[in-house]
Amino acid sequence: MQTVYGIAVQSLFISLGSILMFLHRDKPLTESAYYNKSSRNYLLINVMSEPVQKRNSKKCLARIECLVKNQTCYYQQEKVLIYFNNDRLSGQLTGSSWIITDKMLQPIENFKSFDFDYKKFCRLRHIYSQLYLNENEYSVVARTETKSVLTVLDTLRKKILAVINKRVPSKSENSLLEALMVGFTDDLDPVLLKSYADAGVIHIIAISGLHLALICQFLQIVLTQKAQNKWVRWIKLLVMITCLWGYSLLSGASPSVIRAAGMFSLTLFARNIFRETSLYNILAASAFMLLCFDPFWVFDTGFQLSYAAVLSLGLFSKPIRDFLRVQNSILRALWNAASVSIAAQILTTPVSIYYFHRFPSYFLVANLLAVPLSSLILAGGILLCACNPIHPLAQLIGWVLGILIRALNSFIDHLSGMPGAVVTNLQISLPGIILIYAIIFCSYHFIRFSNKSWLFAGLGIMAVFLFIHMINRVTLS
């Protein structure tokens, strides 16, 4: 009876997932019956981000609000990438400007010089088209700006970026602080970004659980509860959850930061009603809620890596930490930090190799310094924004932050340039990933329960994996 009940529940969720996928399916404007490529189509577009200077143009993300055709307005709501020629008008556009144009939409194309599926990357973000506009090909629409939560957060984000640029003037340093603080990566030097990727610490630039954990800890200190009053507890919970989600939206609302915000919210709520929390239940619940919001996030690389890292930490960090019993307090702290980095790599490495075909050899050394130093820089950035009105103190904090960021960048640049820093040209298929995860699953259960059946199962799956790999090698040669 329990088996039938389990199958029924699983079938129900699979059916609900299929319905959600159907409801969230995209129908690009260019495939609409209203869009005619042989005649003029006037597009009313809302610029969602300020144009950022690229090599030969300014780029921004926008949303097509309406298609105007034959004196009829068709409501659309479709994202589009816009590349403005370096003209006078584009410098006047902000993250809330509106423009109108009759320029034809162009499909997203992959870069010829990079082995990266940019078209798929955009499609997962519901972006199917792009526009290239000269100054005489669009007009700015005069419109009264309405206040909303998003506009308030956008204003706050601009103020934070202004403070960072004022107090930490060097471009190579303030660009990293911008990424750490509010997820603004447009100013990052591509060479510096590659160095972080090659060193295996690109995750510290992406806003994720590390950032929200620091904010949550800061809020816990500020909102210290003196009494066990029920209403005080609920007000404190509401303030903390509001701040966490506000920061998530402020930093760009990527899948990794939304995942972290969802998990922290569920954990804080459970503690507020005096319930024990389970990492795996919270992980599953947050993933379920996010996928109900946007089912296509399951294909997002950041979403997959984020959940793989948290699950890997929950499963392996304690067994790896307990593998060595270190008596010295300093060595014990180093080993604890190293065990976290090793544990996070176990489940994220197959996904990373599948998408990027490379593995950073010195990830352990890089993480031992980069993680605590980036946390210190992030805390310093928060302190900088809080102390900005006090000019001498803000100037001092900015100077110290510049030194710390310069030291971190130099360390990462040196480490990524060492011989053998990156193992490249690694290839793995989707069936190969499934087999690797099955091997990890069997190994984990064998180590935990000392049951030889799991060992034999793991060895059998490994033999199948090696056989498939050998067949592929012979076929390719």
Image: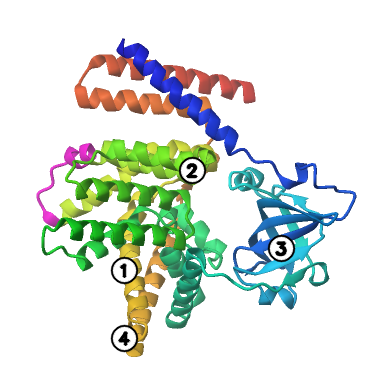
Q: At label 4, which amino acid type do we have?
A: Leu
Q: Does label 2 or label 4 sit earlier along the sequence?
A: 2
Q: Which residue is mark 4?
A: 393
Q: Is residue 407 left or right of residue 240?
A: right
Q: Could you tell me which secondary element the residue under label 4 belongs to?
A: helix
Residue 166 on image: x %, y %: 46, 82
In the picture, the quarter occupied by the C terminus is: top right
The CA span between labels 2 and 4 is 43 Å
Q: At label 3, which amino acid type do we have?
A: Tyr
Q: Which residue is mark 2?
A: 293
The residue located at (28%, 36%) in the rendering is: 315
Q: Which residue is mark 3?
A: 83
- The mark lying in front, picked from 2 and 1, is 2
Q: Which residues are magenta?
A: 318-329
The residue located at (56%, 19%) in the rendering is: 471
Q: Does label 3 or label 4 sit earlier along the sequence?
A: 3
Q: Is residue 71 left or right of residue 308?
A: right
The CA span between labels 2 and 1 is 31 Å
Query: Can residue 417 be spotted in the picture?
Result: no
Q: Which residue is mark 1?
A: 379
| Pointer 4 with pointer 1, Cβ within 8 A | no
The CA span between labels 3 and 4 is 40 Å
